[in-house]
Image (tube, rainbow, N blue to C red):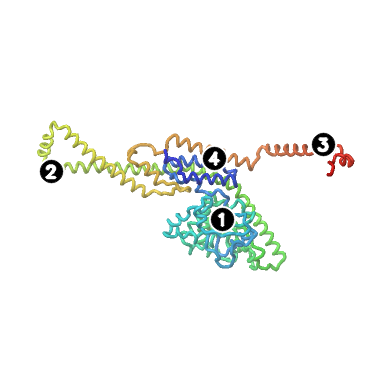
Amino acid sequence: MLFNRPSPNLVERLANLENHLKDEHPDLVQVLPTYRKLDKALYRLGLLANDESLATRITWWPLISVLGTFSSGKSTFINHTLTQKLQKTGNQAVDDKFTVICYSHHDNSRTLPGTALNNDPRFPFFRIGAEIEKVAAGEGRMIDTYLQLKTANAEHIRGRTLIDSPGFDADDQRRSTLRLTDHIIDISDLVLIFFDARHPEPGAMQDTLAHLVSKAASRADRTKFVYILNQIDTTAREDNPEEVVAAWQRALAQSGLASGRFLCIYNEDAAVPIESPTLRERYRRKRDEDMAEITRRMDEVEVERGYRIVSALEDAARGIEGSAIPELDKALDRWRKMVGMGDVAGAVLAVVAAVLTVQAIGWDEIMAFFDSLNGLVISKIALAAAAGVVALSWHYTMRNLMARRVADTLTQKFGAYELNLKTAFLKNTSMWRSAYKGSIAGWSKGTQALVKEVLSNVETHIQRLNDQHTDPSGRKAKELAAARAEAEAKATQLAADQADRPLVSQEQAATAAPAGG
């Protein structure tokens, strides 16, 4: 059916995505057809509109987000990573926008408005304006006040995307800003959360810790969060600098993070002088160790990104049968009971109306009326048809009313991938569907087989990713060693062949040279 197929605009968008993946991330091109298969199953169920795709609800590029409190050194860290001064820095809030930073071959950095992100499906804020509009009316049209895109000719971010967030102050944050924060946390491969060691009272940061730590502690992907205590050099002047770090660690533990571990860093160029050579060396050694850990985690996002994209497929596929279908079943069961009660109420009303009619007109008059119809078959059929029409009208009026009532309790953004539970439910309550029995619309054997096929493909994709990064049997190492030995043997033989060739004397060369050469 046509409504089970992607719209022409979506087909074009997915084709553009495929072309970009071929150019920049060819290892993921094979995953895209599996997303299309799962889309097909979701179209059949009504959980996804045909101008939408799960493939456009995730970011295909490795994404690193940098969050934290005001003046915690986020921008300084990003400038250090890029080896250029791209972001403004200072002790006060210097930027109130989310800044998406990506690689560009142009020598000069360019700053583009939020519209560049809102309308390009390759970036992590595609159509985010519509989401902001739902949170705060009118704000969605002011996307440029929330977002900006910056380019940098920096090799360290080639193939990656960085997001620098405005300083986090939960007491003053607008709901739309929090919505953006939650969005980038959801789609990021790595989340670096910065705190300022110059604020020795973490108790004053409880609101921030609650939003950035407590929620993260209960997430399945909590390992992607790295907590960084920046500007740790300022604690060198404390009588007991270890106690400052310990206080922050306790604050993390109280917010639900079991390990409560911080990576401690500082920027050498902006550091306060540490007079003691021993203490200075100790701080530098700790900083270098933790910076190496951060760099390692950033370098790993390329690998983690592939697994994230494939895992999203598995989560969505399993979520259909494990979550969406049961929710639809419950909603339909509730609706059917309400329709049944409505039909019973209609029957009761019909009986009451009949009794009142008899009382008002009298039984003899009613029987006389029916006697007058004796032999008039058409009149009797018309009367029966009229009664049937009234009964059907009552039934369909009640089922539509109850369907809208139940649908109002359902969400259009169910689960992590924001499936449209409300539309799927309404598809099952159309006039052609029975209100008393029947399976869920679209959940046929063919659809179930399609979901199983997606899960099977997920296993294949994971194995292919594993093959790129692991070699349990050592077969690849042997093949590589054999190929290297073969190449060395060929090089040795070529050198030997060249050595065996007779040298051409100068006289022979002169004789062989063309005249006038």
Disc 3 versus disc 2: nearer the observer: 3
- Circle nearer the viewer, 2 or 1: 1
Q: Which mark is residue 359?
A: 2
Residue placed under numbered mark 4 in the picture:
458
N-terminal label among 1 and 3:
1
Q: Disc 1 on helix, strand or loop?
A: strand
Q: Earlier in the sequence, mark 4 or mark 2?
A: 2
Q: Is residue 67 left or right of residue 383?
A: right
Q: Amino acid at mark 2?
A: Gln
Rendering coords of residue 271 (x, y %): 65, 66
Disc on the earlier residue, 3 or 4: 4
* Circle 2 residues within 10 Å: few <14, some 14–19, many ≥20: few
Q: Nearer the viewer, mark 4 or mark 2?
A: 4
Element carrying mark 4: helix
State the CA–CA distance, disc 1 to disc 3: 57 Å
Which mark sits nearer the N-terminus, 4 or 1? 1
Q: Nearer the viewer, mark 3 or mark 4?
A: 3
Residue at horizontal 70%, vertical 37%?
A: 479
Residue 431 x, y percent position in the rendering: 32, 40
Left or right relative to 271: residue 391: left
For marks 3 and 2, the one nearer the N-term is: 2
Alpha-carbon span between mark 3 and mark 4:
51 Å
Residue of label 3: 497
Estimate the spatial distance between the alpha carbons at disc 4 and disc 2, rounded to whole Å: 71 Å
Secondary structure at badge 2 equals: helix
Indicate which label's residue lies in the foreground, 1 or 3: 3
Q: On the image, which quarter does residue 284 sit in?
A: bottom right
